[in-house]
Image (cartoon, coloured by chain):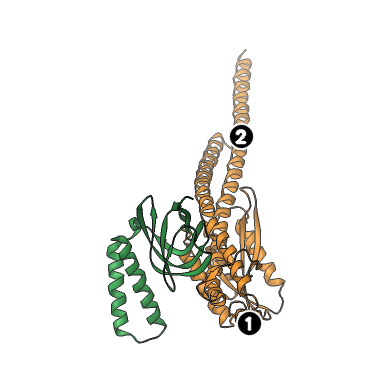
Chain colours: A green, B orange
Amino acid sequence: MAATFELEIATPERLLVKELVTEAQLPAAGGEIGVLPGHAPLLSELGIGALSYVVNGERHRLAVAGGVIEVQAETCRVLAMAAEKPSEIDSARAQAAEKRAMERLATMKENLDYARALNALNRAQARLKVAQ
Amino acid sequence: MPSLIDLRRRIRSVKNTQQITKAMKMVAAAKLRRAQERVIAARPFSSSYEKLLSDVVAAASGDERVASHPLLAVREEQRIQLILLTSDRGLAGAFNSNLIKGAQSFIKDKPGVEVQIEAVGRKGRDFFRRRDQPISGEHTGIFDKSLFADADGIAKKAAGRYANSDADAVYILYNEFKSVMSQRLTVKKILPVPVPEGRKTMDYIFEQPPDQLLGRLLPNYVAIMIYAAILESAAAEHAARMVAMESASTNAGKVIEQLTLFLNRVRQASITREIIEVVSGAAALE
C-alpha cells in the first residue's frame, strides 16, 4: 500500500493544492489534527492557523482561515474560506496587523470587537508563522 | 444630392466607429476568457461544499436546534430583499434591460410585498434610483476583480437583515452564463437557505456536533451562492458585449458598403454630366 493520500485544498476563488501527500497537519477549530493515510472519515470546522503537508519528504506550508475539513481514507479535502501560500504573504503587513490587533486587545473588554480583534491577531500570527 | 465630400466624411466616420466596436469586441473576448477561467476555478470548491453540506444536513436531521437556526427560519414573505446583479458598463446588448425587466416583473408578481433592492452594478442602481424603488444598498465596480470578499460582504449584510427580520426572504436575480450566444435570466432564493437534500454518504466522525457545524457552514454557503452568481454574471456580461459588438461591426460594414455604392453612383453621375456639358458645348460651336 502506497503511504500517500490525496490532499485537496480549495478556496472559493481557486484550487490551491491537489497532490499526493504522506502527511498533513490541519488547524481545526478544536485544535491541530494530524492526518496520515487511512484516516477514519472525519468532518470538522477549520480554524485559523498554519496548515502544513509533506510531499516527497518536503514540508509545505499555507496560512488558512475558516472553512471545513473532510477526511476520508484516501482523500482529505480542505475547503478554506481564505488560504495563502508563503510567497503571497506580505510579512510587513502581517506584522503591522499583529501589532494593531495586540494594541486593540490590550485596551478592550469582551465584546464583539474583541472577538474580531482576536481573529485578526490569529490571522496575522498564522501568516507570520507560515512566512518564516 | 449630397456632395462627394459629405459622403466621404460620412464613410470615414462609420469606419472609425467600426474600429472602435471591433476593438471592444476583442477586449470583451479576452475578458470573457478570463471570466470563464474564474468560473471553472471556483467550481471544485462550491460543488464540494454543497456535497459536504448535504452530508451534515443528513447527520443533523431530526435535531430541533437545526430547524430554529436563524438562517433557516421560513416566514411569510412580506418584505423581500432582491439582490440585482447588473453590469457597471453599458454597450452589452440587451444584457441590462433584460435584468431590469426581470426585476420589474418580479416586483409586479408580488403585490402588497415590499421589495427592497440591493443593487450590484451601476446600471441597475441608476435605473431604480430614478424610479424611487427602495434601495437598501449598492455595490459598484466589483465585477472587474470578482473577489470573494465582496460576495462575503453582500452575504453578511443580507444575512444580517434576514436574521433581524428586516427581510423575510432574500432572492438574487442575475444573468446566468449558458453559452457565448445566450444568457439566461435566473432568480434564486438564497434565504431562507435552500439546503441541499440530505443524503448520508459516509459515517463521519464529527469533531463538533452536526448542528453546530451546520450553523457555521450556512453563512458561508450564502456567500458562496452569491459569489457563484457574480462570476456567472461577469462571464455573461462579457459574452453579451462580445456578441453585441460583433453585430455592431457587421452592421457598420453594411453601412459602409451602401455608402460607398452611393458615393460611386454620385461620382459617376457628376462625371456623366460633365461629359454631356463638354460634348454639347463642342456641338454648339460647329
10 Å neighbourhood of mark 1: few (<14), some, or many (≥20)?
Answer: few
Q: Quadrant of residue A104?
A: bottom left
Q: Secondary structure at mark 1?
A: helix
Q: Residue at x 65, y 66 (%)?
A: B199
Q: What mark, if any, has residue B174 been given in the picture?
A: none
Question: Decide: marks 2, 1 in contact (CB < 8 A)?
Answer: no
User: What x and y, as percent, mark residue B278?
Assistant: 59, 20
Q: Which residue is mark 1?
A: B64
Q: What mark, if any, has residue B257 been given in the picture?
A: 2
Q: Residue at x 48, y 67 (%)?
A: A67
User: What x and y, as percent, mark residue B141?
Assistant: 47, 62
Task: Please state if A76 lies on the left or on the right of B65 as rendered.
Answer: left
Q: Nearer the viewer, residue B129 or B14?
A: B129
Q: Nearer the viewer, residue B122 or A4?
A: A4
Q: Quadrant of residue B255?
A: top right
10 Å neighbourhood of mark 2: few (<14), some, or many (≥20)?
Answer: few
Task: Please state if B190 lies on the left or on the right of A75 as rendered.
Answer: right
Mark 2 and mark 1: Cα distance apart in space: 72 Å
Which quarter shows the C terminus of chain B?
top right
Task: Please state if B130 lies on the left or on the right of A107 as rendered.
Answer: right
User: What x and y, as percent, mark residue B185?
Assistant: 65, 59
User: What x and y, as percent, mark residue B1?
Assistant: 62, 37
Q: Secondary structure at mark 2?
A: helix
Q: Nearer the viewer, residue B159 or B87?
A: B159
- Residue placed furthest toward the bottom: A109
Q: Nearer the viewer, mark 2 or mark 1?
A: 1
Three-letter amino acid code of the residue under disc 1: Glu
Q: Quadrant of residue B210?
A: bottom right
**Residue B190 makes an appearance in the image:** no
